[in-house]
Image: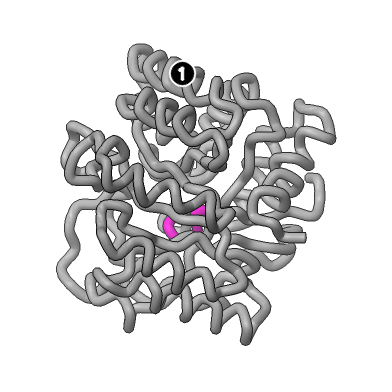
């Protein structure tokens, strides 16, 4: 394992600010999640990663209640001020909203702000569906607000399925000055021959855009286990397309904690990267994340 390591995708949940966690369990992309309907404070996160070689982390938004986009950033900034973790923030902004410019301007007051995630993934399977339609990134309102990312020098975390990757590639091409990071290596949910072909073709389209990067996170989501061979397969194919300089690793904790522990995820990515040169391993585990999220 190459050290140091940066966790470019983790969540610190707080139930008081997310009322949905207290409600009835509803179908979600990662299956049964009653074990997550509680606080996940940064202290527990630090305990989970102890001894794994992780030295910095990036917080990615957790879908707080509507209208709490600013409060989420302010709260995470306060946690960082108290504990020194996390080291960067990716917020939520609704790019369909007329209020997006004002929300972004206020979030920009946080020294740790580095980017935005608005989950755009849509699937024919309702359990996998998040966005109300598959083409939200193509609306005039979205494009107008999306352009503001360049003014703030923020990146965008793109979360889509293979059926949406052509639109994702077009978005990246239309905004060459904005860095995009594909979530969860494109969420390869269909492991059939046809499904993997569609994922691979979509990933090729995305990789053709030089401002597109990808993240090795959440790879247990659809199989609901930490499968070292599955991770190695996805990592190997993705590195071939994107190159290590455009790939980062992230734990997706605490969601992955539903079926594994933090050290096991670190070990799995380490095993997947073992056949590659040291420079590539260091890029995926540290250097690319440090550059994208300006971690110093």
242 over 93 or under it: above or below = above
Check the picture and name the quadrant holding the C terminus: bottom right
5 over 236 or under it: above or below = below
Can residue 261 be seen in the rendering of this structure? no
Q: What residue sits right under mark 1 in the picture?
A: 200
Query: Picture coordinates of residue 147 (x, y %)?
Result: 44, 46
Query: Picture coordinates of residue 144 (x, y %)?
Result: 35, 47
Where on the picture, by quarter, is residue 295?
Answer: bottom right
Residue shown at 18% from the left, 45% from the top = 132
Between 294 and 43, the one nearer to me in the picture: 294
Main SS type for the magenta part?
loop
Residue shown at 55% from the left, 20% from the top = 208
Can residue 122 be seen in the rendering of this structure? yes
Relative horizontal placement of residue 158, taking residue 210 as reference (left or right): left
Between 136 and 258, the one nearer to me in the picture: 136
Between 101 and 53, the one nearer to me in the picture: 101
Residue shown at 63% from the left, 83% from the top = 81
Residue shown at 37% from the left, 23% from the top = 166
Where on the picture, by quarter, is residue 279?
Answer: top right
* 76 in magenta: no
- CA neighbours of label 1 inside 10 A, class few (<14), some (14 to 19), many (20+): some
Query: Picture coordinates of residue 16 (x, y %)?
Result: 32, 83
Check the picture and name the quadrant holding the N terminus: top right
Which residue range is magenta in the image? 251-255
Between 274 and 20, the one nearer to me in the picture: 20
Instruction: Give the total number of marks visible in the rendering.
Output: 1
Query: Picture coordinates of residue 262 (x, y %)?
Result: 58, 57
**Residue extending furthest right?**
278
Where on the picture, by quarter, is residue 139?
Answer: top left
């Amino acid at each position: 394992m190459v050290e140091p390591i940066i966790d470019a995708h983790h969540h610190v949940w707080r139930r008081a600010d997310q009322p949905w966690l207290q409600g009835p369990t509803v179908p979600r992309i990662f299956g049964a999640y009653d074990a997550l309907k509680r606080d996940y404070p940064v202290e527990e996160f630090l305990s989970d990663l102890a001894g794994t070689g992780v030295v910095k982390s990036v917080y990615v938004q957790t879908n707080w209640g509507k209208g709490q986009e600013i409060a989420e950033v302010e709260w995470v900034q306060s946690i960082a001020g108290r504990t020194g973790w996390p080291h960067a923030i990716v917020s939520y902004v609704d790019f369909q909203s007329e209020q997006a410019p004002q929300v972004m301007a206020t979030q920009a007051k946080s020294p740790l702000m580095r980017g935005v995630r608005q989950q755009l993934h849509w699937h024919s399977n309702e359990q996998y569906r998040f966005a109300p339609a598959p083409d939200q990134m193509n609306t005039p309102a979205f494009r107008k607000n999306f352009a503001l990312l360049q003014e703030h020098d923020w990146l965008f975390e793109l979360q889509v399925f293979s059926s949406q990757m052509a639109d994702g590639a077009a978005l990246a091409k239309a905004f060459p000055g904005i860095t995009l990071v594909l979530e969860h290596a494109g969420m390869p949910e269909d492991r059939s021959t046809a499904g993997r072909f569609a994922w691979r073709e979509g990933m090729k389209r995305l990789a053709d855009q030089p401002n597109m990067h990808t993240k090795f996170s959440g790879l247990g989501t659809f199989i609901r286990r930490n499968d070292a061979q599955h991770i190695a397969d996805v990592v190997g194919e993705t590195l071939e397309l994107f190159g290590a300089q455009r790939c980062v690793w992230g734990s997706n904790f605490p969601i992955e904690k539903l079926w594994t522990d933090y050290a096991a995820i670190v070990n799995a990515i380490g095993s997947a990267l073992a056949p590659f040169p040291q420079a590539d391993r260091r890029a995926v585990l540290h250097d690319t994340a440090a550059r994208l999220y300006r971690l110093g």
